Image (cartoon, rainbow, N blue to C red):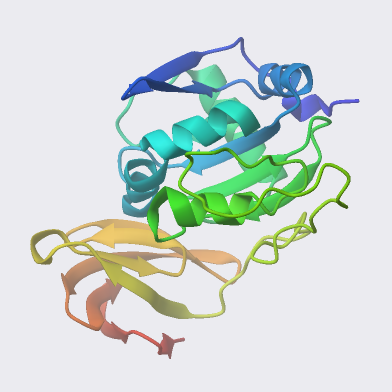
Amino acid sequence: MMKKWLICAGVIAATLRIHGAEVEWLTDVPAALDKARLENKVVLLDFTGSDWCGWCQRLKREVFDQPEFAAFAQVNLVMVAVDFPHNKPQSPEQKAANEKLAGTFHISGFPTLIYLNQFGQQVAIGGYIAGGPKNFISQVERIPGIKHVEGSGVARKDQEPDAPPRPPPAFVPIAPATPIRYAELALKGISGPKDRRMAMINNETLLVGETAKIKVQDIRVEVFCKEIREDSVLITIEGKPMELKLGQHQK
């Protein structure tokens, strides 16, 4: 039986055409689960900040917009966008439904990918993976029930029909009971070209000049990104200047 949190607005679907392939994005979880049961697929919830989150945009550009992934998704996945935009229009009903989903799955950063079986049970959790569609698909194929698709950018031998199901992906924890909590600030990565670098602090991505509320333990602190260097970032926290370096933490 589906939980009450799955009840939300009607189906809104968008189709992205990529070199003849199509990826259909839904925003209604009950409709996605109905489709998954009908087509024997896994539901992928993409918790994203589509118009501001640099890592979310990279995931879309490097993986979701690629024809190899489109071919793979058509066979295996029902895609659901759970978007938290800053500037894109969004109905109050959709916003409330997305916030409810984020609370249900303890989402603490973007992008976060939640995989559900046909009964709405979480079977895996993931995020951005470097290496394009080939590497991404190689990880997702380890989820039970996911089928290999020729031409999806993954080269491996198919399993025998009667082979035992593959174990859940080792790269993801299953059904986390509590949200991730950071006891300190940490610079987790720097990416992008020199004129548009992005810094990931805890689970938030910032460009130079951007401000974000970053969660530390049970509170959120206001962090302003002043400068992004080769291996460090200059920030201000609640007005206090500070430098964070890769591999180091700041309490």
> Residue 147 occupies which quadrant of the picture?
top right
> Residue 50 occupies which quadrant of the picture?
top left
Please state the total of marks drawn on the protein image.
0
- The reply to whether residue 48 is in sight is yes
Q: Nearer the viewer, residue 217 or 194?
A: 194
Q: Nearer the viewer, residue 250 or 30?
A: 30
Q: Which residue is at 43% across, 79% downward?
A: 186
Residue 116 sits above or below residue 133 on the image: above
Residue 22 sits above or below residue 130 on the image: above
Q: Nearer the viewer, residue 237 or 80?
A: 80
Spot the residue most to the top: 10
Q: Residue 144: horizontal and vertical position, in percent?
A: 77, 47
- The reply to whether residue 107 is in sight is no
Left or right: 42, with 95 as reference point: right
Q: Which residue is at 57% across, 47% downward?
A: 113
Left or right: 103, with 194 as reference point: right
